[in-house]
Amino acid sequence: LVLSCLERLSGLGAAEIERRIEQEAKAEKHIRKLLLLGAGESGKSTIFKQASSDKRKIVSSVVLTSTIYKFWVLTLQIKLLFQTGFDEGELKSYVPVIHANVYQTIKLLHDGTKEFAQNETDPAKYTLSSENMTIGEKLSEIGARLDYPRLTKDLAEGIETLWNDPAIQETCSRGNELQVPDCTKYLMENLKRLSDVNYIPTKEDVLYARVRTTGVVEIQFSPVGENKKSGEVYRLFDVGGQRNERRKWIHLFEGVTAVIFCAAISEYDQTLFEDEQKNRMMETKELFDWVLKQPCFEKTSIMLFLNKFDIFEKKVLDVPLNVCEWFRDYQPVSSGKQEIEHAYEFVKKKFEELYYQNTAPDRVDRVFKIYRTTALDQKLVKKTFKLVDETLRRRNLLEAGLL
């Protein structure tokens, strides 16, 4: 009798398992796989942040390291735009990351003043006042730790004093030479709020937070909302962009509906974190070229996000595009907004040329679209993802012979 009951229970369990497997298989057929690729610091994880939610599934280990960081804002944008956003507990979990970013940034700037003072013909420009030297040494020591203290009012006041020193400002103007993060000004302008004893990060703070993505992070979302059946459901994979992370990409390449490739167009005058001899834009060019050559992407749609346009439009009027080897043939034609647009179109054309060099002219089964993005701009990211959704749905209808 006991054996008979066990057999029946076992049978019911197997049936339930089979039923669930069948349900999941049916559900999987309606989910489109998107792969988010790009070099480190490209801003792709920032867009991922916009979409991710508490429903986010960690596929393999994701280490939020403070010592080596990377914008993962693209990811968070999806969370904020298409899912549940962040609850108070999630927001509070970013406090250590944001405080670490503050300490690391001020250390970079302090150490940069010493490096420039030793190597430049006019060291006075990079020499701190005697009082600020003492403050700087203390903060640099904190910034070198593995565990950072909570940012207090006293420490924030010291950081603000150091930040306002002319030598630090001069050093910050050469931030592209020191791996100074894009969020530096934002952090320094908000020190008082960030150091409040009751501080809870805002959504914007979280988008600016810098961590390094290692492993693979996966989320599921719909650009038209979870309750609207007319839209596609997408599963988006974000992977680390640094060179040592790219070996983890390969196993994700099969069955991809579209690759979203993120290129930080503002980084044409900067070098890689992991190789300070390598220009970031040249690395992006070579990586995009490599992605386009992958046989498994032969029929995969490519969505190119020309990201960090907000930084690009400020920089390009002061730092000529032709400092980058890939853009040596660039010739400015105007000034102001007209020049910004001219420079952007030049960069866009370079990527278009690279795409068509790797794609047969008669290839019609692969969609290629370029989008101008600013990963921190929620409205723009939302609009962009809806355009991506429309493009991919239209392709599905064409393949089904309905258009």
Image (tube, rainbow, N blue to C red):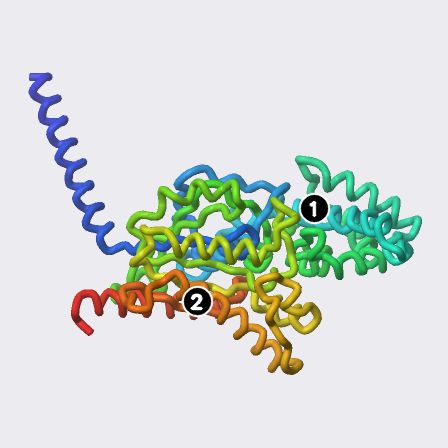
- Mark 1, secondary structure of its residue: helix
| Residue at numbered disc 2 | 382
Whichever of callouts 2 and 1 sits on the residue coming sooner in the sequence is: 1
Q: Is any atom of residue 374 visible in this view?
A: yes
Residue 17 in percent (x, y) is at 18, 36
- Mark 2, secondary structure of its residue: helix
Disc 1: CA contacts within 10 A as few (<14), some (14-19) or many (>=20):
many
Label total for image: 2
Q: Residue at 40% across / 50% down in the picture?
A: 237
Dividing the picture into quadrants, the one containing residue 361 is bottom left
Q: Is residue 335 above or below residue 255?
A: below
| Residue at numbered disc 1 | 104
Q: Find the distance from the CA under tag 2 to the CA under tag 1.
A: 31 Å
Q: Which mark is residue 355?
A: none
Q: Amino acid at mark 1?
A: Gln
Disc 2: CA contacts within 10 A as few (<14), some (14-19) or many (>=20):
many
